[in-house]
Image (tube, rainbow, N blue to C red):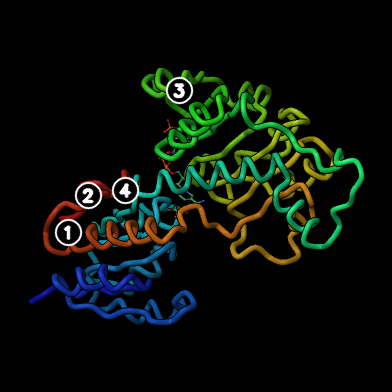
Amino acid sequence: MKPYVYLAKPVPEEVENYIAEHCSYDKWEGSEPIPRSELLQKLGQAEGLLITGEKIDDELLDHAPNLKVVSNISVGYNNFDTDAMKRRNIIGTNTPDVLNETVADLALALMLSAARRVPELDKLVKDGKWEKKSDEPLFGVDVHGKTLGIIGMGRIGEAIGRRAKFGFNMDILYHNRHRKMETEKELDASYVSQEELLQKSDFVLLMVPFTEETKHLMGREQFAQMKKSAIFINTSRGQTVDEGALTEALQNGKILAAGLDVFDQEPVSPDNPLLELPNVVTLPHIGSATYQTRFDMAMLAVENLVAAVTGKEPASVVGELKGVLK
Ligand SMILES: NC(=O)C1=CN([C@@H]2O[C@H](COP(=O)(O)OP(=O)(O)OC[C@H]3O[C@@H](n4cnc5c(N)ncnc54)[C@H](OP(=O)(O)O)[C@@H]3O)[C@@H](O)[C@H]2O)C=CC1
Ligand SMILES: O=C(O)C(=O)CO
């Protein structure tokens, strides 16, 4: 008998066909995310669960006595309570690498948009406010040749660093908990303390996972350490930034501008004061959102799912849960 899995997230037909070859399954067909109460009801028989970002905690796991694997269609897995999963010998998988280049493209788009004020000036033109006088009020700042500081030089951070170094001739600073000698060599990058990175960078870009350690990694003190002319980019998770402190820094000219793909609350509340600021470029968490990359992520996620429920080792089990499946 084929193992039974539940798909809480729709996937492309070709990906679903792969599941059908190996598993029996049921799926959520709504266009909205599956309501929590509905999800909990679906888990009684499931050996595998496919999700994007739903919270996996004791409450959910108590409804899933047969579960072996939760496969996340995303690389970030801050939605996993890994301790609760470990206690029950349930593994979690994610989708690393297949999205690196796509997310890096978007990070550069945010840097360029914020520096050259692209959305603000696009609106000006479309509002019929392009006038035949001095264009100095429309000036932005250069990206090429400037210094980029990457906090979280991992898989995606490196892809961003390559674009910045080889495409824009930028100097690269980075900060992680551990040094990466090969990356330093490849990108001629310098490992510095977080404080030095904040003080010296023209662009500060956050690409860390959201963990207890990185919660509000950027707060009032950190924004105060940045140059007044610097631009802050967040493509990691909203919770890594104290949004109140960021708003204040932007309003008071402590930093020049920001580019944000992620927010503390998503979808962002329409009354979030960051949305009022002309020097903030905002996006709805679309770092990996191209047709090809979302397809690749879904395929990797179901390959992980199928592997785990058919007794094989999935390609990308998250670090904390490696080896817990019995
Ligand atoms: N906006 C979007 O759409 C997307 C957002 N993301 C987010 O990006 C994150 C990173 O993805 P990815 O590059 O694949 O992950 P990686 O694990 O490859 O890289 C993360 C890097 O962060 C560093 N890091 C971790 N904790 C800290 C810390 N406390 N202080 C400083 N550095 C730290 C790690 O180095 P070390 O261990 O040495 O500290 C590592 O180099 C994901 O977890 C996800 O949240 C990912 C994809 C799309
Ligand atoms: O993969 C992730 O972590 C995302 O944020 C969306 O692709």
Query: Where residue 112 sits: x, y (%)?
Result: 63, 41
Distance Cα–Cα, label 3 vs label 4: 27 Å
Query: Where residue 226 sits: x, y (%)?
Result: 71, 29
From the viewer's perspective, is 275 left or right of 313? right
Q: Say what amino acid the circle numbered 2 marks.
A: Ala
Q: Residue at x 44, y 36 (%)?
A: 159
Mark 1, residue position: 307
Distance Cα–Cα, label 3 vs label 1: 36 Å
Q: Say what amino acid the circle numbered 1 marks.
A: Ala
Q: Which mark's residue is nearer the viewer, 3 or 4?
A: 3
Tell me if I can see residue 211 in this picture: no
Mark 4, residue position: 318
Element on which disc 3 rests: helix
Instruction: Say few, some or many: other residues with alpha carbon within 10 Å of mark 4 (under 14 / 14 to 19 / 20 or more).
Output: many
Distance Cα–Cα, label 1 vs label 4: 14 Å
Q: Which mark's residue is nearer the viewer, 2 or 4?
A: 2
Q: Residue at x 45, y 53 (%)?
A: 78
Mark closer to the chain start, 3 or 4: 3
Q: Mark 1 and mark 2 in contact (Cβ < 8 Å)?
A: yes
Distance Cα–Cα, label 2 vs label 3: 28 Å
Seen from the viewer's position, the closer of residues 307 and 257 is 257
Mark 3, residue position: 187
Q: Mark 4 and mark 3 in contact (Cβ < 8 Å)?
A: no
Tell me if I can see residue 223 in this picture: yes
Mark 2, residue position: 315
Q: Whereabouts is ligand 1, in terms of quadrant?
A: top left
Q: Which mark's residue is nearer the viewer, 1 or 4?
A: 1
Element on which disc 4 rests: loop
Q: Say what amino acid the circle numbered 3 marks.
A: Leu
